[in-house]
Image (tube, rainbow, N blue to C red):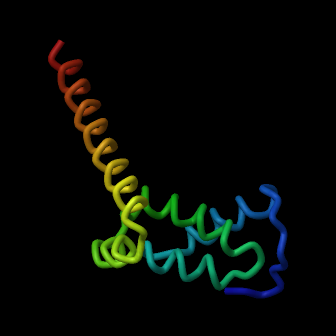
Amino acid sequence: MQETNTFDGTCEKTVPQAIFVFLQSNDFEDSIRKAISIGGDTDTIACMVGSISEAYYGIPKDLRNKALKLMPEELRKTIISAYEMKKENSKKKENTKEQDMCL
């Protein structure tokens, strides 16, 4: 995937690259691999691609569990707590939509 990509940390360069990589991907892991292989500011591009890919594909359970095991305990607790809050907020929004439809 890498041709002549050079390091450029500006958003004018990295955002289009991240979107391009995501659009060329088939799943979450594929998107991260492609983001790393494109070259340039790979950590920034991979962070953006990972965020987009998580929202679109979700993170495979095996990758998620492996990453959680490698994290320090405090960080793991914070991430799990954030996902639990996200689930609660999604349920609240869903309930509100259902109530609005009934009115």
Residue 34 image offset from top left, x and y in percent:
59, 81
Residue for point 72% across, 86% down: 2
Identify which residue is drawn at 52% across, 65% down: 50
In this rendering, position of residue 14 left or right of residue 4 = left
Percent x, y of residue 89 = 30, 36
Q: Quadrant of the C terminus?
A: top left
Q: Residue at x 37, y 67 (%)?
A: 59
Q: Position of residue 26 (x, y in %)?
A: 45, 76
Q: Residue furthest top?
A: 103
Residue 58, by quadrant, is bottom left
Which is nearer the eye, 22 or 43? 43
If the image is split into quadrants, where does the N terminus sit? bottom right
Q: Is residue 39 left or right of residue 71?
A: right
Image coordinates of residue 8 in percent, x first then y, are 84, 69
Please state the total of marks drawn on the protein image: 0
Residue 4 to residue 68: above or below: below
Q: Is residue 87 left or right of residue 49?
A: left
Query: Relative to 81, is 94 above or below?
Result: above
Query: Can you tell which quarter of the image residue 90 is in?
Result: top left
**In the displayed structure, would residue 88 be above or below residue 100?**
below
Quadrant of residue 28 within the rendered picture: bottom left
